[in-house]
Image (spheres, helix red, strand yellow):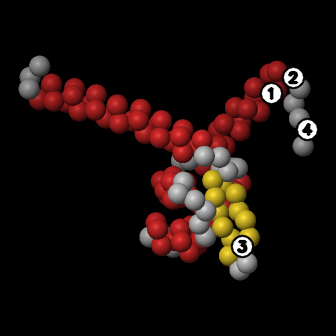
C-alpha cells in the first residue's frame, strides 16, 4: 500500500475512506449492531439474540463492519467477542439522530401549519 504525500491525493484518499465508512452505516442492521456493541463486547450468539436476526446475517454484517474498521474481533476460547473500534462512532450516530429528530419535528410543524390552513 502506498501512502499518499500529495495534498490532493491525501484528500482523495480521505474522501474514499469516508465513503467506505458511510457505506458500512448504510444498513439498519449494521446500525443496530453498533448500538448493541455500545454496551460492551458481545459474541455472535448474544448479538443474534439481542437483534432477533439470524446468525448468518449477523456474521455477514459484522464482517462488513470489521472490514471498514468500525468493529474489532477478539478470540475468547471457542467464541469471538466483537467490540466497537472507537466509541466516537456512537457519538457521531447520536449526533446524526439528533439532526434527524429536529428535521422530523420541523416537518411536523410545517404539516400542522398546512393542515390548519396557515
Residue 87 horizontal side relative to residue 13, left or right: left
Measure the alpha-carbon separation of dots 3 and 4: 34 Å
Position of 63 with respect to 45 (left or right) is: right
Residue position marked by numbered label 4 in the rendering: 2
For the point 48% across and 35% down, the residue is: 95
Instruction: Pick the quarter of the image with the N terminus.
Output: top right
* Mark closest to the chain's N terminus, 3 or 4: 4
Q: Are marks 2 and 1 in contact (CB under 8 Å)?
A: yes
Q: Residues within 10 Å of mark 1 (few under 14, many from 20)?
A: few
First in sequence, mark 2 or 3: give its number: 2
Q: Which residue is mark 1?
A: 10
At label 2, counting other C-alpha atoms closer than 10 Å, the crowd grade (few under 14, some 14-19, many 20 or more) is few
Which type of secondary structure does the marked residue at label 2 adopt? loop
Which is more toward the observer, 3 or 34? 34
Figure check: 85 above or below 60: above
Q: Secondary structure at mark 1?
A: helix
Label 3 secondary element: strand
Whether pointer 3 and pointer 4 mark residues with C-beta atoms closer than 8 Å, the reply is no
Q: Is residue 29 above or below residue 44?
A: above
Residue indicated by mark 2? 6
85 sits to left or right of 112: right
Residues at discs 3 and 1 in contact (Cβ within 8 Å) = no
How far apart are labels 4 and 2 at the CA level? 12 Å
Mark 3 closeness class: few <14, some 14–19, many ≥20 residues within 10 Å: few
The residue at the point 47 percent across, 36 percent down is 96
- Residue 58 is situated, as x and y percent measured from the top left of the image, at 56, 67
Q: Is residue 115 left or right of residue 1?
A: left
Q: Position of residue 66 (x, y in %)?
A: 69, 56
Amino acid at each position: 500500500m502506498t501512502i499518499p504525500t500529495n495534498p490532493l491525493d491525501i484528500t482523495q484518499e480521505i474522501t474514499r475512506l469516508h465513503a467506505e465508512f458511510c457505506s458500512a452505516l448504510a444498513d439498519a442492521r449494521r446500525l443496530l449492531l453498533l448500538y448493541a456493541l455500545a454496551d460492551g463486547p458481545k459474541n455472535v450468539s448474544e448479538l443474534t439474540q439481542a437483534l432477533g436476526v439470524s446468525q448468518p446475517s449477523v456474521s455477514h454484517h459484522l464482517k462488513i463492519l470489521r472490514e471498514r474498521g468500525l468493529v474489532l474481533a477478539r478470540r475468547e476460547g471457542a467464541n469471538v467477542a466483537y467490540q466497537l473500534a472507537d466509541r466516537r462512532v456512537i457519538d457521531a450516530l447520536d449526533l446524526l439522530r439528533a439532526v434527524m429528530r429536529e428535521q422530523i419535528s420541523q416537518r411536523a410543524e410545517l404539516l400542522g401549519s398546512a393542515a390548519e390552513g396557515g
